[in-house]
Image (spheres, rainbow, N blue to C red):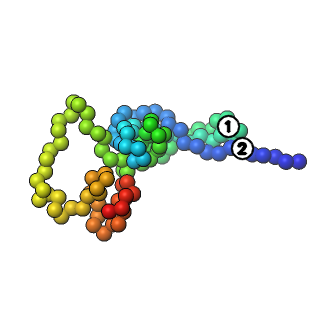
Amino acid sequence: MFFFFVGGVNQQVGQVLKSGAGRCIACGSRADLVECEKVLQLFFVPVWRWPGKEPLMYCNNCNSLFPPKFSPPPPPSADSPPPRQLPDSAFSDVLRCQFCSREVDPSFRFCPFCGSSL
């Protein structure tokens, strides 16, 4: 006699906490801050749900879930004021990633936020 078990634990988006809170680390489109819940599924039927530990960022474009600390800031909207321009001397002693423009420790070889080579 054979018995096949089909099941597993998945994460599902529960409630949107803040729409457009950041950008996706995979595709760069807008990402929402959401509450997630874990779901135990047996034979593709949800059996048990429990809340996740912390909110996550969710991209509607590529369905990625990732922690908010890895998300670059959201793209500017038409209502927001233009970003403040800093003098070039302000960036002389700071290493920034060429892809996500976030400040990186000079001892790193790869950006911890987007994974690109520095």
- Element under disc 2: loop
Q: Residue at x 30, y 69 (%)?
A: 107
| Neighbourhood count class around disc 1 (C-alpha, 10 Å): few under 14, some 14–19, many 20 upward | few
Q: In screen coordinates, is 53 left or right of 40?
A: left
Name the residue furthest bottom. 107
- Vertical relation: 100 (above or below) 30: below
Whole-percent x, y for residue 95 in the image: 24, 62
N-terminal-most mark, 1 or 2: 2
Q: In which quarter of the image is residue 96?
A: bottom left
Q: In which quarter of the image is residue 49?
A: top right
Q: In screen coordinates, is 109 left or right of 93?
A: right
Could you tell me the amino acid type at mark 2?
Val
- Say which residue label 1 marks: 44
Name the residue furthest right. 1
Whole-percent x, y for residue 41 in the image: 65, 40
Q: Which residue is drawn at 53% across and 38% down?
A: 12
Q: Is residue 55 visible?
A: no
Q: Is residue 69 visible?
A: yes
Cα–Cα gap, marks 1 and 2? 7 Å
Whole-percent x, y for residue 59 in the image: 43, 39
| Neighbourhood count class around disc 2 (C-alpha, 10 Å): few under 14, some 14–19, many 20 upward | few
Whole-percent x, y for residue 51 in the image: 52, 40
How many numbered circles are shown?
2
In the depicted view, which residue is nearer to us: 110 or 32? 110
In the depicted view, which residue is nearer to us: 10 or 114? 114
- Say which residue label 2 marks: 6
- Asked if labels 2 and 1 touch by Cβ distance under 8 angstroms, the answer is yes
- Element under disc 1: loop
